[in-house]
């Protein structure tokens, strides 16, 4: 993966999600023992959505985050955006959402058009993390909030060897059995291990212009929920 060019990497990631779309939600529940549901609830609470707020669920996948936002605040105006048609079609079985096909690096929205933007497990898959953050800053209104639910590289600890066994051996094995694509579930843990630690992502958010940045670690330091505001 590290040797692929930007376009090649984008195509590779697109194909990965094409292959796993049908079993994506089931695999999330299995890989996290159902904890991903709780993380999404936390992420949406941190958005502090008001009635009629305009929310962008970016890299929406099958729409779990957007649906959680509507559950917590029914009157928001939601847009669920993703670049992968297979994922969006898979999400339709859980009910309709206002879907938009969009590239996270070139969002088709005017400046200052959203009150909040949320993403779940998106940023480690984009070709340019910096460009994705700048685009999210651009489309937010002043005072708008960003919340990022993402894997994070743990800094080491008592449970680190067990975490690595789970990511490198258990997840590909289960992924192969459930989705039929073991290779995809080698890529996903590998992309997590090579991604930024939580402090580094916070620094990237600051460089993109966000302020009042914070984060919470989950699942032995392998998951982080970051938040910030447009100054």
Image: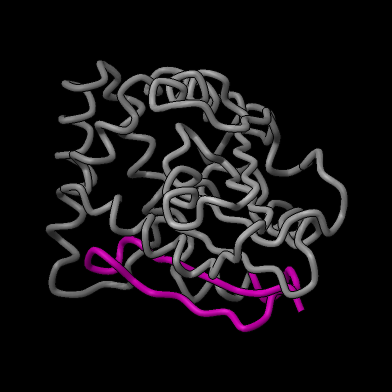
Place of residue 149 in the rendered image (x, y in percent of width and height, measured from the top left): 45, 58
| Quadrant in which residue 6 is drawn | top right
| Secondary structure that dominates the magenta span | strand
- Is residue 199 toward the left or the right of residue 170 in the image? right
* Residue at 48 percent of width and 63 percent of height: 196
- Nearest the viewer among 111 and 179 is 111
* Residue at 37 percent of width and 39 percent of height: 188
- Is residue 185 toward the left or the right of residue 144 in the image? left
- Is residue 192 toward the left or the right of residue 46 in the image? left
Q: Identify the magenta region.
A: 205-231
The correct choice, above or below, for 193 with respect to 62 in the image is: below
Place of residue 52 in the rendered image (x, y in percent of width and height, measured from the top left): 66, 57
**Residue 220 included in the magenta stretch of the image:** yes
- Is residue 180 toward the left or the right of residue 85 in the image? left
* Residue at 44 percent of width and 62 percent of height: 43
| Quadrant in which residue 106 is drawn | top right
The correct choice, above or below, for 50 with respect to 186 in the image is: below
* Residue at 65 percent of width and 48 percent of height: 77
Place of residue 41 in the rendered image (x, y in percent of width and height, measured from the top left): 37, 58
Q: Residue extending furthest right?
A: 110
The correct choice, above or below, for 102 with respect to 141 in the image is: above
Q: Quadrant of the C terminus?
A: bottom right
The correct choice, above or below, for 193 with respect to 86 in the image is: below
**Residue 208 included in the magenta stretch of the image:** yes
Place of residue 28 in the rendered image (x, y in percent of width and height, measured from the top left): 28, 39
Q: Residue extending furthest bottom?
A: 212
């Amino acid at each position: 993966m590290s040797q692929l060019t930007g376009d090649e990497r984008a195509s590779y990631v697109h194909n990965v999600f094409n292959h796993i779309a049908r079993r994506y939600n089931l695999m999330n529940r299995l890989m996290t023992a159902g904890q991903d549901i709780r993380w999404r609830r936390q992420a949406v609470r941190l958005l502090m959505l008001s009635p009629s707020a305009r929310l962008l669920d970016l890299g929406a996948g099958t729409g779990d985050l957007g649906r959680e936002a509507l559950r917590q605040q029914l009157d928001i105006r939601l847009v669920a955006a993703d670049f992968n048609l297979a994922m969006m079609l898979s999400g339709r079985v859980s009910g309709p959402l206002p879907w938009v096909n969009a590239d996270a690096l070139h969002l088709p929205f005017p400046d200052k058009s959203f009150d909040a933007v949320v993403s779940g497990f998106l940023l480690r898959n984009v070709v340019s993390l910096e460009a994705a953050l700048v685009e999210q800053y651009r489309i937010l209104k002043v005072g708008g909030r960003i919340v990022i639910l993402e894997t994070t590289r743990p800094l080491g600890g008592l449970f680190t060897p067990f975490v690595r066994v789970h990511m490198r051996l258990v997840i590909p094995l289960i992924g192969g059995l459930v989705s039929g694509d073991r290779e995809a579930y080698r890529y996903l843990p590998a992309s997590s291990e090579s991604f930024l630690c939580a402090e580094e992502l916070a620094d990237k958010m600051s460089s993109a212009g966000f302020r009042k940045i914070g984060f919470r670690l989950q699942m032995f330091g392998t998951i982080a929920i970051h938040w910030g505001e447009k100054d």
